Amino acid sequence: MIRWREGVVRSIGRSWHGAVEIMVDGADGEMRALAFPQVVGEPVPGERVLLNATALELGLGTGGYAQVVATPDRLPADPPPGPGHLVKARYTPLQTTVLGVDEQDSPWHATLRDADDLGGMPVVVADLHSALPAVVAGIRANAAPARVAYVMTDGGALPAWFSRAVSGLRDAGWLTGTVTVGQAFGGDLEAVTLHTGLLAARHVLNADITVVAQGPGNLGTGTKWGFSGVACGEAVNASVILGGRPVGSLRVSDADERPRHHGISHHSLTAYGRVALTSADIVLPDLPGEFGEKIRAQAGALRGRHHVVTASVDGLNEVLQACPIRLSTMGRGLDDDRAYFLAAAAAGRHAESLLHHDS
């Protein structure tokens, strides 16, 4: 199940918040690897590393890295004594203990103990992690920047540190903070469930708008129900239960050659059409031509249960071009799959408009 490798660190490459790229010389040649210093310590050239090369050997689309499991000849010191007993990645060899925002030792426990209401906060729900920067760009398109939190679910990568998008948005001041929920970890705040993560975004980070999406990577099997994005429907349910205002970002593509993902992806149609049991604003980008007609027809399946909002994309291309990080989904950039990013940005713009409707 695990493709183990070992090697020697040749050089240290680029780094971002919580992660460091390294080049490793191993028995099979040179490998690019990723280390999370908070888990395995800071890598040093010339030292031996143990690697999990599974994703690299399988050629998976997200990452392309071997993962550093340990520096066996120089183990990091134990963390200093302190609060925190939430275990994430539970009962795996790399389970880690964090301080949960909602646990008894947290300074915010009293705030969250009886918290039960998001106060109408817009919650933008997206299938893929790559939608995050586009959604935030759309939120920032029309007015003074809102406080935006990101709640990262555990359908993709578990360490938030894996995401260069989160690091870049954080450095640019576009994100107020990240909450990692479920088995995901490494956010500014840690929470047990999506529900407490949303409440922490509202009551601890004081977010005006929260974006919910899985971490980098997406698990799909080409079947109707076997994909991690079903969590979008569950996020809609959680938002409504807690008194939020869910906004569904559609996964739209005019470049994906797979019929199930061309137009509105079956992921969105299934998650919002079957899993979501409560109503959301589903944002349909107003795109021209035959492709626009196609997605308008597909969105008909969501009407009735949801409020399908047709949103203008005027000016959003320029907003996306000004994004502080490179936009990419399934290896396609803005020029390759413009409809995908416009749809996500339109959802963000609509969520921001709700703040003014409620004021």
Image: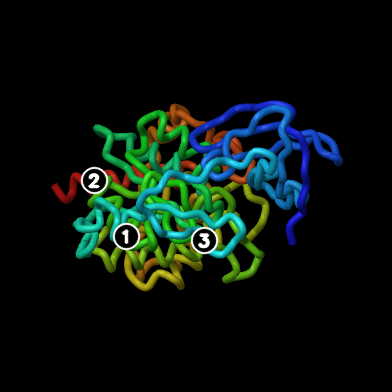
**Residue named by callout 2:** 206
**Vertically, is 283 above or below 113?**
above
Give the number of marks: 3
Q: Nearer the viewer, residue 236 or 313?
A: 236
Q: Nearer the viewer, residue 197 or 49?
A: 49
Question: Which mark lies nearer to you, 2 or 1?
Answer: 1
Q: Nearer the viewer, residue 313 or 71?
A: 71
For residue 169, side relative to residue 46 (left or right): left
Q: Are marks 2 and 1 in contact (CB under 8 Å)?
A: no
Residue at the (39%, 37%) spot, across then down: 137
- Label annotation for residue 229: 3
The amino acid type found where label 2 is placed reads Asn
**Residue named by callout 1:** 103
The Cα atoms of the two marked residues, 3 and 2, are separated by: 27 Å
Secondary structure of residue under mark 1: loop
Secondary structure of residue under mark 3: helix
Residue at the (53%, 36%) spot, across then down: 327
The Cα atoms of the two marked residues, 2 and 1, are separated by: 19 Å
Q: Earlier in the sequence, mark 2 or mark 1?
A: 1
Question: Which mark lies nearer to you, 3 or 1?
Answer: 1
The Cα atoms of the two marked residues, 3 and 1, are separated by: 28 Å
Mark yes or no: residue 172 visible. Answer: yes
